[in-house]
Amino acid sequence: MTPRGSQATARTSSEARAVARTQTLIKGEHGTGTVRRTTLPGGLRIVTETLPTVRSATFGIWAHVGSRDETPALNGATHYLEHLLFKGTRKRSALDISAALDAVGGEMNAFTAKEYTCYYARVLDTDLPLAIDVVCDMLTGSLIQEEDVDVERGAILEEIAMTEDDPGDCVHDLFAHTMFGDSALGRPVLGTVDTVNALNADRIRRFYRKHYDPTHLVVAAAGNVDHNKVVRQVRAAFEKAGAFREPVAAPVAPRGGRRTVRAAGRMELIGRRTEQAHVILGMPGLARTDDRRWAMGVLNTALGGGMSSRLFQEVREKRGLAYSVYSYTSGFADCGLFGVYAGCRPSQVHDVLKICRDELDHVAEHGLTDEEIGRAVGQLQGSTVLGLEDTGALMNRIGKSELCWGEQMSVDDMLARMASVTPDDVRAVARDVLGQRPSLSVIGPLKDKQASRLHDAVA
């Protein structure tokens, strides 16, 4: 039997743990907003960036689940679920959900990625309570009925078909498979026709209950918002829905690394009767938590991030071999990708790939000039600031940062990290990343002789 005093002490301790914790993470200055975070006792995190000078607000909820959390049989379930949360709740029909935002001129949408999912609404600041109510209702009260699953299956199959009809988009899925094989990162976010047809309401409901617990969610709001009001409204919406199954729970930590196996020197070709051949030449990149990502950003910008970049100048400006040519990076929890994309006439594929491979090899061995690095740093800094000029971009930044890193970085700190990149930093990351044997993905109408020559690009 526990003494009465011990019971009182335990109850007091539990109550103390159940108090919401609020922190100011970034103090607004130089035109930037104040960023605050509140962690509710049930494990839900709420982050806001307050900008009193704007008249809009964007509200979003980020879920710690993406396509890499799916088994092969569940491939496409995360994206399928994203669609279904718009189909109706206990309070609202699908029409009610869309009409509520349309009636105030708002915008509402969602997107699914390999490691997270986001639902958001952008409205006038005076309509923020409506946006909070609707989006929270969708996340906590979705019905996921069999008839809605059947109807939405057709829309998702059409979305898959639309992607298949766009080889410039489809080649990125092919490159992920080339690099990661049949692992979760190598499978398409949308799923396949077979896996989508095999999913049913019961399997999707189980997936929903497992991954949409408040401990797996981050709420983010940016614009002319009052942090305390947002917290009260979100907390009321989740409590009313009975979403806090555990009164005291800790948020899940940012996704840890699992060291996904990445390929080198692989090539995959899909024959299509297209006017252009679409190619991606690339290699393993950096995880999103790698401190070298700032130098990698500078390297990527100088190589293929703009009209003054090496690849754009060599492939398009000097030779006119492609209209679209660029490089990009993708960072995941444990690994990453670096790729060079080009769309060109099938007869020019070998020449384009040779130029791209020669440039990558040259930069891996000799690095970039100081002038190129300076220009790339300036381009990165400018595009970063200009890209944060609307409340949607701000919401994306703070929501993703909280979910993926568990911390916030001010704009000034980001600019300082970019400015601190040295030529030696860029040379080192170029040697480490570009010095690897590349892999290649191609979609286009290539003949057997042309296809056999493509092996030169990955030799």
Image (spheres, grey):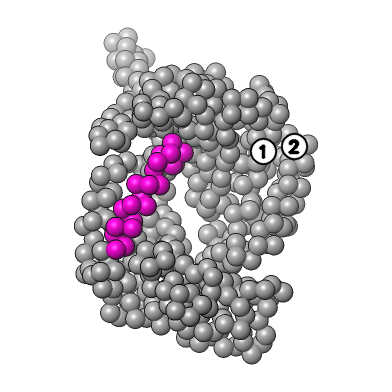
In the image shown, does 34 or 320 lie closer to the viewer?
A: 320
Per the image, label 1 sits on a secondary structure element best described as helix
Tell me the amino acid under the disc marked 1: Leu
Residue 131, position in %: x, y?
54, 26
Rendering coords of residue 310 (x, y %): 38, 73
The answer to whether residue 254 is visible is: no
Question: Are the residues at dot 1 and dot 2 in contact (C-beta closer than 8 Å)?
Answer: yes
Identified by mark 2, the residue type is Asp
Q: Earlier in the sequence, mark 1 or mark 2?
A: 1
Locate residue 70, reporting x and y percent: 58, 51
**Which residue is at 34% across, 46% downward?**
385
Q: Which residues are magenta?
A: 375-396
Q: Which residue is mark 2?
A: 148
Q: What secondary structure predominates along the stretch shown in magenta? A: helix
Residue matched to label 1: 84
**Marks 1 and 2, how far apart at CA:** 7 Å
